[in-house]
Amino acid sequence: MNSQVDFPLSREAQRLKRSMMRQLIAVTARPDIISFAGGLPAPELLPVEAWSECSQRVLKDEGAKALQYGPPFPPLQAALAELMQARGVAVEPDQVFITSGCQQGLHIAGRLLMDADSAVVLDQYVFPGVRQAFGGFDRDLREVPTHVERGFDLDALEEATSPQRGPAPRAIINVPDFHNPLGTSLSEEARVRLVALARERNLALVEDDPYGLLRFSGEALLPLVGRAPERTIYLGSFSKLVAPALRTGWMIAPAGLTEESVDLESSAWIQRSLADFLHAGRLEPHLAQVRTTYRQRRDRMTTALETHFPASARFSRPQGGMFIWVELDDHYDTLALLPEVVEAGVAYIPGAAFSSEGGHNTMRLNFSNASPERIDEGMAILGQALRERMPA
Amino acid sequence: MNSQVDFPLSREAQRLKRSMMRQLIAVTARPDIISFAGGLPAPELLPVEAWSECSQRVLKDEGAKALQYGPPFPPLQAALAELMQARGVAVEPDQVFITSGCQQGLHIAGRLLMDADSAVVLDQYVFPGVRQAFGGFDRDLREVPTHVERGFDLDALEEATSPQRGPAPRAIINVPDFHNPLGTSLSEEARVRLVALARERNLALVEDDPYGLLRFSGEALLPLVGRAPERTIYLGSFSKLVAPALRTGWMIAPAGLTEESVDLESSAWIQRSLADFLHAGRLEPHLAQVRTTYRQRRDRMTTALETHFPASARFSRPQGGMFIWVELDDHYDTLALLPEVVEAGVAYIPGAAFSSEGGHNTMRLNFSNASPERIDEGMAILGQALRERMPA
């Protein structure tokens, strides 16, 4: 911690360092860099025109009402319940809570589930916000090894929740569709087993689902909240579906938990504009375009991985979302390599940024933000840097 | 807690009940009710036109950039540093962090300052979000009695921070200007003593300041962050200054604390639109109008208190902000009275909603949201209900 502050801070603040990921994304935001680092939607697909129309109509027609405090807006709740129903999840509109996105949802879930000494189960590699929301104090974060193509190791998961491991954890946190950073999805069999385990051990499931609607190949599987609604806290977000700047998401939780949970305050204006956007049927055509584009970019990146990377590299083959996970041979150090490839004009996130320890030979590659040509160009540079460092 | 949830929850969640205030505000949102309950800006002054222009210009001129993820936007940080400088607070733009409002700021401050068993000092009556952000676990919330005209009892404050009371608290939380719910402001003498005490005991100060720029009478006093920048976490908000639906505020904290503090993510679009609004000089004329209107309404409510309420009622005389605090004779029960006066067409918040215990004979009255005529009308109804219940 910085020595300029001399009054006492929490132990958590003393441990805090500015997240590696945030630092890296800042470094790599230079426009001359081909960045596979961030998790940004394709800029050319952001619905600027449509959003301008919806947000202006709301201000024009509803005036001051749109600028006041915003309790949950029933037409938006209804549209979200419909969106979930289309994925096979039956939910009543008043069970849908409006959040400022998945990160706020994770913090609320952490508050509802975790005491100062509770345990929780999560993947070995997670979005850093998960540790922020569930860690700290004397909490026990039980990390489960992950597989580059399947995600969660379910045998290890079973072991991590067993009474031999100590007090029962409060929840299993997961991203069943297009995991960040892994890009993996849980199979039907894995979902069934995960839900059975949660029931057997009486744990909550936290389903973090910012990418679920970005499926561009393979078969859609029922989300966990559709399988175990009595114990699932589901978190959705418009950041990847419409635009990050809306700062709006939603939460579905067992009846009785949300009712009394937490006072949420969302923008009346954004809620009304989103309801307008959804009711006018603007989401589906927009998502269709996004999915087509992301599939092309994933294909391009996968081909480039096969062409340019060392043959020993293992990587995930996501059916949606934004990220591919790469595991290189053990002698690679992706954190040490990064400054050199940034110098050469390319960036990624070293896997260590998602891990409490380990992951030195892994990286997360984002395929949504760069054009196919830039993907080719960047992957060739990256592949060359890796091949130059292959053992003789 | 609701019996539908059978998996284990945190102790905090088990204690949670939907906040009394939120329930009351929902009940009293009926348009036929004259509501002194909420904390809503005057709807007719919300800058719908100006905001529409700024937000559209940004979408039109900056396109996709406005809809992506939003790191702190330097022109907004610069405008906020200027705004603080006009109040006598010297601050560098890069020390200004953009938040989603004071509530997020309180949560961040809680995370930076509080361990699971830390103590903190606060007013006897506080906005419920303060207890949400700093309470829970085994924390010791030391409540200091408040005076209806002066706020904090500083002798009691000194006692609450003394070594005899146990481990040193981590911070003193306060609203120096136009306290919610009390309407009081700290005098120059009180500010000097508060800062000296924080230095002597080496505590942080959390300065919650959503109303400071809404001063309509009396002399502006230097905020705490201008007196003890080395130990003050200052929280500002646009909710009352421009519009609640922007969900945007700012935080100033000692260098070294903010740098590494917490990853904040704010809407690029709203940040750019606000920067536009501020740089175009739209804030000051807007605030001038708000102040004039709120002063008239405070005067109207104060006169009505003197005319209609029992002579024994004590009340604060705010020099700004939105709220008047009323202390009635001990035999009144404002919680029990509320349903009856709602029936008669008026609403307020019973003081107990801001207190962990006590306050049965107190109420918070909001004067910003209703027209002068509705204030007269509502206060007459309320006064009559109180006089009917005077002891014979």
Image (spheres, coloured by chain):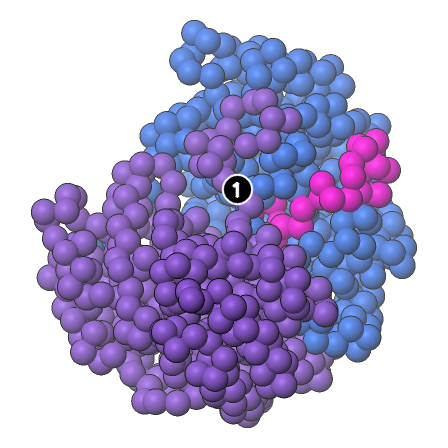
Chain colours: A purple, B blue
**Residue at horizontal 65%, vertical 67%?**
A344
Determine whether A163 is above or below B149 in the image: below
Q: Does residue B55 appear to the left or right of A82 in the view shown?
A: right
Chain of residue at mark 1: A
Image quarter of residue B12: top left
Residue A310 rendering spot, x and y as whole percentages: 43, 75
- Type of amino acid under label 1: Lys
**Residue at horizontal 55%, vertical 77%?**
A379
Q: Magenta stretch containing residue B98, yes or no? A: yes
Which corner quadrant holds the C terminus of chain A? bottom left
Q: Does residue B37 appear to the left or right of A108 in the view shown?
A: right
Residue A184 rendering spot, x and y as whole percentages: 35, 74
Which corner quadrant holds the N terminus of chain A? top right
Q: Nearer the viewer, residue B363 or A69?
A: A69
Can I make out residue B70 in this image? no
Residue at image mark 1: A17
Callout 1: few (<14), some (14-19), or many (20+) C-alpha neighbours within 10 Å?
some
**Residue at horizontal 49%, vertical 71%?**
A387
Q: What's the magenta region?
A: B80-104
Q: Magenta stretch containing residue A18, yes or no? A: no
Residue B95 rendering spot, x and y as whole percentages: 71, 41
